[in-house]
């Protein structure tokens, strides 16, 4: 598959040739590795005479043989990324030997070098850079892999499955053989060779299997792997208890890598992780880091069933594994911690990233109908919106039926490549419900808008809700099946337990028509409605709330998410419409919340956080960059002034609770203290409280929050504090990323100067994705004041760096370019500056990833 070709879902055909078994032999070396492959191939009887073709890129072919005999040169050709072999019509054994060059592979796809180690990344189409294969997810094989390498340099040799042999070889070399009995596609292949240490423990699964859990890292990093090892066991136990899924190999290995494009990869039995999602201790990692590590470890572990044991028919089904597994990891975190706070975090991300994606030139359905470059579809739509679709199914069916449907799906498709239709069919069979209308969520892009109007009839003692669904910009869009969770509250703040005719469950309306009316009888007073509780559906909702009604909801709402949502609505009214009533109501609601000693401090901290720039910009219409930033800052200043006494009181009152390590109560306390600190620092040009917190040291969460306040509010001690921080953590690349991110996000137009200085410094490592994200990703995504400078300097800087990065790692470059997504909605001057950069870039990039993004951005 080449990026210039358009791939269409409608064109799917089964593979003409399948691989039943793979035997790989690696002679591993950093500069040059040789890979011998023997594939047991079988033709599809329904496609007689089909040419035998295998994918391969950047491979030096050394040897090729068919059924044990060398293949004559006129029988094969290798061009355009395809190895084609003539005259083969029945099952055969194809042996090839190729040379590849890991040290020169800066794309971080296939086999590459990271530090002193060699490791792989094969999803989506990286295996073709290791050896020839039918590189598509519906070709599943069993695998035996033998790794040979210099023992002194690579004492640890890991691959998928179970270890079956190991030993010494001549000349200081050694070998290890691994066998994976579970059929898998080549995108799940992995190997790691390096001088690594490990933390390990043996556990018994619910089925009685003894499993060795191990986390591998460089020797100096090993003490920071303990939390990750514990998280693996928590994920294993949770999946057994919640979904009945048990682990199926003798070992589960995880490796931390400093150079990794993604967050992590779920290769069967050998997960390879970006080191930022493994390495952690209180000295170097924030509370958010610990929670992210637990979540990502859960995500990759849960893929063992939702992705590995049951994989994908084709890449159009990507959300079948990713959306389902994101839902599973969200539930994992929610069950272990605060469900309301977790839901708020997930919806913040959805609104700021996915809603913007749905409204821009890169919009696509959760299951796209076509693509040119699959790497560009690892998006918020596929992951986060895909998870929301699964959550809606869970809401519609309920936990027991959803679990039964998932069990059926896994049982019927174990060891196979599945489709969205297979997943929905299992749910339909388990529930007895038709889901054909619901399936439209996968095929239809855009964020639905629900317009809701409520009317109380005093004489008839009834309350009528009229709900209309639409997809803005898509007048011909099909009607979706939307579950809408709701509550009605009386004047006393008590929920009214009412159900309209035709509704089978309390608190749930099912929307299946463009316009629907719901009538509640026996309503003696005008109720206060609350909609989309827990954000049960990924929609925008328009209801004409007054500031007073939202303030009442903020007090009486029993759903933690919707309590937060009421305050977010007040903030949006104050910022976007200049509503003084909303501003005052928000201030009063937050004051009451801060005064409630029984409120979850983490939830209070979330309520203090206003909608971010991207969320506000996504509310529709032309983006007024300066107006949005100014109005948001003005509201933050006002809240800081109005709440100063309450903020300071809570800050000091929570000091004792915040001192208890990683206990949930301590994490929540630190979260609120640091949210309070950020607001209080606005009132003190000397930033004395932030300086005192920084000087006190403590855990990374507190130290970094204080340093952020010092740097972002230009405190007198900012430069000295930064120097102390840098010196203390100088050898740690992950902590270096943290202070670089603080400089990149300093809310000032002149932050560009600091970014440019870092680009010219020893700290700039363009081959390291984490460093690129820390500096350029944060500038483009989290610093609108600098990125959207009126002179276009931010746009020019990002475009220039993206062009340079395209020659190093095209995936990273393309992801940077996605920051330009809302450019057409900017003011005319800024839009013209972005367009100039995008059109100039078309002649400066060579990769299919970047060219595809530019074509879609400019379409």
Image (cartoon, rainbow, N blue to C red):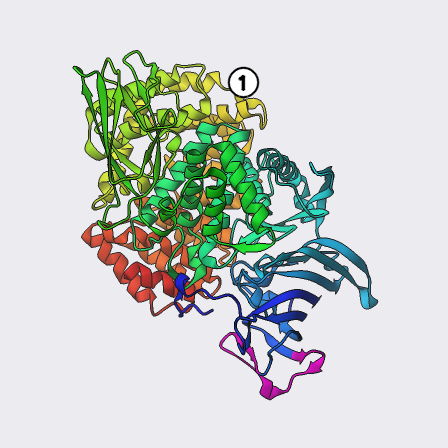
State which quadrant residue 208 falls in: top right
Residue 694 picture location, percent across and down: 49, 30
Name the residue: 45% across, 29% down: 341
**Residue at 45% of width from left, 26% of height from top?**
602
Q: Identify the image quadrant of the C terminus.
A: bottom left
What are the residue bounds of the magenta stretch? 63-86
Could you tell me which residue is drawn at 41 percent across and 35 percent down? Answer: 396
- Residue 62 location (% of width, % of height): 65, 79
**Which residue is rendered at x = 35% and y = 42% of the image?**
352
Picture layout, residue 334 above or below residue 175: above
Q: Specify the farthest residue to the front.
A: 432
Q: Is residue 73 magenta?
A: yes
Residue 544 forms part of the magenta stretch: no
Q: Is residue 403 visible?
A: yes
Q: Quadrant of residue 642?
A: top left
Q: Position of residue 115 (x, y in %)?
A: 62, 57
- Residue closer to the observer: 692 or 632: 632
65 left or right, relative to 606: right
Residue pointed to by mark 1: 656
Foreground of the two, 425 or 685: 425
What secondary structure is marked by label 1?
A: loop
65, above or below 348, in the image: below
Residue positioned most to the top: 492
Q: Nearer the viewer, residue 301 or 176?
A: 301
Does residue 681 appear anywhere in the picture? no
Instruction: Decide if residue 305 is on the left or right side of residue 364.
Output: right
Residue extending farthest left: 459
Which residue is at the front of the view, 347 or 813? 347
- Judged left or right of residue 645, residue 824 is left
């Amino acid at each position: 598959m080449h990026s210039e070709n358009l791939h269409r879902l409608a064109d799917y055909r089964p593979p003409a040739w399948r691989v039943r078994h793979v035997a790989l032999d690696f002679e591993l070396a950093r500069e040059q590795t040789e890979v011998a492959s023997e594939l047991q191939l079988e033709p599809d009887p329904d496609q007689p005479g089909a040419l035998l073709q295998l994918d391969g890129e950047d491979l030096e072919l050394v040897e090729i043989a068919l059924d044990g005999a060398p293949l004559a040169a006129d029988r094969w050709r290798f061009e355009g990324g395809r190895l084609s072999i003539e005259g083969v019509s029945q099952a055969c054994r194809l042996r090839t030997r190729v040379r590849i060059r890991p040290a020169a592979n800066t794309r971080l796809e296939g086999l590459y070098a990271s530090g002193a180690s060699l490791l792989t990344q094969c999803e989506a189409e990286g295996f073709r850079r290791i050896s020839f294969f039918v590189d598509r997810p519906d070709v599943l094989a069993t695998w035996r892999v033998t790794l040979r390498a210099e023992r002194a340099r690579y004492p640890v040799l890991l691959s998928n499955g179970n270890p079956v042999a190991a030993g010494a070889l001549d000349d200081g070399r050694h070998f290890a053989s691994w066998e994976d009995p579970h059929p898998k596609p080549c995108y799940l292949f992995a190997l790691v060779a390096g001088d690594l240490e490990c933390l390990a423990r043996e556990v018994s699964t619910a089925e009685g299997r003894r499993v060795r859990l191990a986390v591998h890292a460089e020797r100096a990093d090993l003490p920071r792997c303990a939390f990750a090892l514990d998280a693996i066991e928590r994920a294993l136990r949770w999946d057994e208890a919640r979904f009945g899924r048990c682990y199926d190999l003798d070992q589960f290995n995880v490796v931390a890598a400093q150079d990794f494009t993604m967050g992590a990869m779920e290769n069967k039995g050998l997960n390879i992780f970006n080191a930022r999602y493994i390495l952690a201790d209180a000295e170097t990692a924030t509370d958010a880091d610990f929670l992210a590590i637990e979540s990502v470890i859960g995500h990759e572990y849960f893929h063992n069933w939702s992705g590995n044991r049951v994989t994908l028919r084709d890449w159009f089904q990507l959300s079948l594994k990713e959306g389902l597994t994101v839902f599973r990891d969200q539930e994992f975190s929610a069950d272990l911690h605060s469900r309301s706070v977790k839901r708020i975090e997930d919806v913040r991300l959805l609104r700021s990233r996915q809603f913007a994606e749905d409204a821009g030139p890169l919009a696509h359905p959760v299951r796209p109908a076509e693509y040119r470059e699959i790497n560009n579809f690892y998006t918020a739509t596929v992951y986060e919106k895909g998870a929301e679709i699964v959550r809606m199914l869970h809401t519609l069916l309920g936990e027991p039926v959803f679990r039964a449907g998932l069990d059926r799906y896994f049982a019927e498709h174990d060891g196979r490549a599945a489709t969205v239709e297979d997943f929905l069919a299992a749910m339909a069979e388990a529930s007895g419900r038709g889901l054909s209308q619901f399936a439209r969520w996968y095929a239809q892009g855009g964020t639905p808008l629900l317009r809701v109007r409520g009317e109380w009839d005093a004489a008839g003692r009834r309350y009528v809700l009229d709900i209309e669904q639409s997809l803005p910009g898509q007048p011909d869009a099909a009607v979706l099946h939307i579950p809408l969770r709701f509550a009605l509250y009386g004047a006393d703040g008590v929920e009214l337990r009412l159900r309209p005719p035709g509704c089978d469950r309390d608190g749930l309306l099912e929307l299946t028509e463009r316009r629907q009316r719901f009538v509640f009888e026996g309503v003696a007073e005008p109720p206060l409605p609350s909609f989309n509780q827990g954000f049960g559906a990924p929609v925008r909702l328009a209801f004409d709330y007054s500031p007073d009604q939202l303030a009442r909801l903020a007090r009486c709402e029993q759903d933690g998410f919707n309590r937060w949502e009421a305050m977010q609505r007040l903030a949006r009214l104050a910022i976007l419409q200049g509503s003084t009533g909303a501003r005052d109501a928000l201030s009063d609601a937050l004051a009451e919340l801060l005064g409630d000693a029984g409120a979850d401090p983490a939830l209070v901290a979330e309520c203090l956080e206003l909608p971010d720039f991207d969320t506000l910009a996504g509310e529709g219409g032309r983006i007024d960059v300066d107006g949005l930033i100014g109005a948001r800052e003005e509201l933050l200043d006002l809240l800081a002034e109005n709440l100063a006494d309450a903020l300071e009181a809570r800050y000091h009152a929570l000091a004792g609770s915040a001192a208890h390590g990683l206990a949930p109560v301590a994490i929540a306390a630190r979260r609120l203290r640091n949210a309070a600190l950020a607001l209080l620092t606005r009132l003190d040009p000397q930033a004395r409280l932030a300086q005192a917190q920084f000087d006190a040291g403590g855990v990374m969460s507190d130290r970094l929050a204080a340093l952020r306040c010092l740097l972002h509010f230009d405190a007198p001690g900012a430069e000295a504090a930064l120097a102390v921080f840098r010196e203390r953590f100088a050898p740690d690349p992950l902590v270096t990323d943290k202070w670089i991110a603080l400089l990149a996000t300093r809310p000032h137009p002149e932050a560009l100067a600091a970014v440019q200085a870092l680009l010219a410094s020893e700290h700039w490592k363009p081959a390291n994705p984490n460093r690129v994200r820390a500096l350029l990703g944060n500038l483009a995504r989290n610093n609108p004041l600098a990125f959207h400078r009126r002179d276009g300097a931010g746009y020019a800087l990002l475009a220039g760096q993206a062009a340079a990065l395209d020659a190093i790692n095209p995936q990273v470059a393309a992801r940077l370019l996605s920051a330009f997504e809302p450019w057409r909605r900017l003011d005319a001057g800024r839009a013209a500056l972005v367009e100039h950069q995008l059109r100039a870039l078309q002649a400066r990039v060579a990769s299919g990833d970047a060219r595809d993004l530019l074509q879609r951005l400019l379409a």
